[in-house]
């Protein structure tokens, strides 16, 4: 009788494990398939550079000097990607015009010569890597429409000098939707296609090559945007690990909540890569936050892509110096903690995943198991259920074997 009872308990326990694994099978499989890196990798993903305040030139030079002060054991400098904005409203020309029509000033205008010179210098030295962020950081017709009822936007369009896109309401900084009113509306595929042709052409004219990597502004984009980018040479899209397609009635980004992992594919076979933490010193993100992210993502076998923005390095000089000092400290401590730390670009990672480059991506079973366990440990609901059902025991044993 006891043996029968024990047998029934074991069968029930195994059934519970099977059900739990079945329910989470898609996520568990996706985490297993995600590439596992052999080395810690640190990349700074920085947005909003380009058309904007001319003080960027001096701050870009300061960033270059910080980055050039560090190398990994392979001799590579740290890379800060530059999400490039190619144009912005020429508010002075608009104010001088007889009729209120949108007029843009592009990054190749002589007024931006110092900014472009600083960008080119960093690119040539290997510490900056340009990425397409957008022609503007907004959809111009939407900004013009919003200015009719929004005093803040109307004032922005009358800026004396070169305006900053960061000063617009956040909902309007999403380029690929109509957020003049909320909830936002979709743009037509024809409008999107024409805009992509325009921005790819401008990017190519300025940097001498088509953009390979695109970063959607505010991470709001659609399948139509992906297809248009892919049709014009973009092979990789940087994401926050999900996709937003609209703004809700409160102006908040809204999406389907799906989880995106490194190496997954989208429309036109574009590859997704994931930014997995922030380094925004002006928001209180110190070097320790970057180091914590590096430790976690290294355990998960992922590259650490830290998101940062130009606002951290512009404006108040004292605050900008603090941001630069934190960047320098983060790099110093990361090199001290990780002897095998590699400084690569986001494009390097995308190309390594696409080619299954085994000098960077491991296929060793035990290493993959350790990374997989670290990844699923972040699935809080699954992990709680694993503890409740006892699945934690075989997972723990698997980890001990792989250690």
Image (cartoon, rainbow, N blue to C red):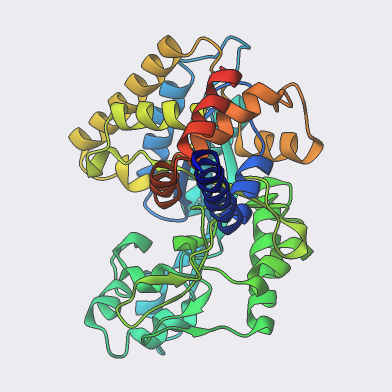
Question: In the displayed structure, would residue 137 be above or below residue 7?
Answer: below
Residue 334: image location, x then y, percent: 42, 18
Q: Is residue 71 visible?
A: yes
Quadrant of the rendered structure where residue 307 is? top left
Residue 210: image location, x then y, percent: 73, 52
Residue 236: image location, x then y, percent: 67, 51
In front: 20, or 231? 20
Q: Residue at x 49, y 19 (%)?
A: 68
Quadrant of the rendered structure where residue 146 is? bottom left
Q: Residue at x 72, y 68 (%)?
A: 227
Quick one: which residue is furthest to the front in this view? 1
Q: Is residue 109 visible?
A: no
* Quadrant of the frame with the C terminus: top right
Question: In the displayed structure, would residue 180 be above or below residue 382?
Answer: below
Question: In the displayed structure, would residue 15 be above or below residue 402?
Answer: below
In front: 314, or 289? 289
In front: 261, or 348? 261
The image shows a total of numbered marks equal to 0
Q: Residue at x 40, y 88 (%)?
A: 145
Question: In the displayed structure, would residue 248 be above or below residue 279?
Answer: below
Q: Is residue 323 left or right of residue 351?
A: left
In front: 91, or 28? 28
Quick one: which residue is furthest to the right in this view? 355
Residue 192: image location, x then y, percent: 64, 76
């Amino acid at each position: 009788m006891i043996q029968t009872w024990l047998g029934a308990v074991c069968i029930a326990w195994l059934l519970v494990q099977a059900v739990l694994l079945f329910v989470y099978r898609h996520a568990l499989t996706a985490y297993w398939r995600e590439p596992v890196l052999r080395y810690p990798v640190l990349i700074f993903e920085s947005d909003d550079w380009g058309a904007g305040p001319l003080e960027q030139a001096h701050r870009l030079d300061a960033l270059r000097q910080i980055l050039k002060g560090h190398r990994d054991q392979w001799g590579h400098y740290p890379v800060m990607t530059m999400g490039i904005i190619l144009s912005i409203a020429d508010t002075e020309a608009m104010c001088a015009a007889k009729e209120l029509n949108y007029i843009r000033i592009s990054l190749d205008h002589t007024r931006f010569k110092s900014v472009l010179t600083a960008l080119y210098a960093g690119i040539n030295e290997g510490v900056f890597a340009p990425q397409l962020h957008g022609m503007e950081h907004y959809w111009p017709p939407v900004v013009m429409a919003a200015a009719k009822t929004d005093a803040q936007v109307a004032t922005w369009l009358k800026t004396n000098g070169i305006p900053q896109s960061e000063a617009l309401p956040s909902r309007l900084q999403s380029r690929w939707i109509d957020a003049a009113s909320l909830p936002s509306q979709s743009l037509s595929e024809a409008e999107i296609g024409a805009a992509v042709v325009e921005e790819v052409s401008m990017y190519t004219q300025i940097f001498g090559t088509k953009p390979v990597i695109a970063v959607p502004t505010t991470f709001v984009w659609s399948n139509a945007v992906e297809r248009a980018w892919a049709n014009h040479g973009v092979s990789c899209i940087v994401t926050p690990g999900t996709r937003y397609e609209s703004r809700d009635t409160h102006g908040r980004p809204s999406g389907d909540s799906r989880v995106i992992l490194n190496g997954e594919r989208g429309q036109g076979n574009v590859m997704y890569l994931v930014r997995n933490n922030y380094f925004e010193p002006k928001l209180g993100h110190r070097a320790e936050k970057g180091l914590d992210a590096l430790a976690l993502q290294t355990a998960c076998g992922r590259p650490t892509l830290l998101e940062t923005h130009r606002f951290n390095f512009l404006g108040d000089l004292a605050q900008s110096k603090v941001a630069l000092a934190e960047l320098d400290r983060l790099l110093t401590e990361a090199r001290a903690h990780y002897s095998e730390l590699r400084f690569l670009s986001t494009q390097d990672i995308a190309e390594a995943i696409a080619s299954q480059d085994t000098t960077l991506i491991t296929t060793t079973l035990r290493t993959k198991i350790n990374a997989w366990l670290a990844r699923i440990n972040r699935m809080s609901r699954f992990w709680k259920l694993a503890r409740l059902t006892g699945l934690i025991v075989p997972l723990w044993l698997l980890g001990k074997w792989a250690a």
